[in-house]
Amino acid sequence: MQPRFISSCMADWDADSAQLEQNLRSVLETIQDDSRRRTIVSVQTARLWHTGILGGRFGVAAREVTTALAAF
């Protein structure tokens, strides 16, 4: 059994939420639209899907990363 930390800012990657479901539906609609248009899938397309799925749930704002790196 792994210990759980009381104070953690890491999102629960396995948690299900309404936001995740909405993101998945949105990305699926995009994929369906692209497939109907026979859009060629690229690495950039997969990155956009990934960003769309995780959007609003995970990640850190660029400003926060820059500030943390500058302090490092």
Image (spheres, rainbow, N blue to C red):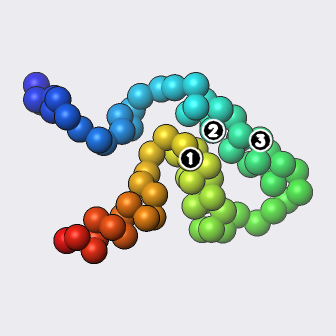
**Disc 1 marks which residue?**
55
- The reply to whether discs 1 and 2 touch (Cβ–Cβ < 8 Å) is yes
How busy is the neighbourhood of tag 3: few (under 14 within 10 Å), some, or many (20 plus)? few
Q: Is residue 66 left or right of residue 4?
A: right
Q: Residue furthest bottom?
A: 70
- The reply to whether discs 3 and 1 touch (Cβ–Cβ < 8 Å) is no
Q: Earlier in the sequence, mark 3 or mark 1?
A: 3
How busy is the neighbourhood of tag 2: few (under 14 within 10 Å), some, or many (20 plus)? many
Q: Can you say whether 17 is above or below 57 in the image?
A: above
Dot 1 falls on a residue whose secondary structure is loop
Quadrant in which residue 9 is drawn:
top left
Q: Amino acid at mark 1?
A: Gly
Q: Is residue 61 left or right of residue 3?
A: right
Dot 2 falls on a residue whose secondary structure is helix
Locate the N terminus and report the quarter of the image it occupies: top left
**Disc 3 marks which residue?**
29
Residue 8 % position (x, y)? 23, 38
Residue 64 % position (x, y)? 38, 60
Residue occupying the point 74% across, 48% down: 31
Picture disc at residue 23 = 2
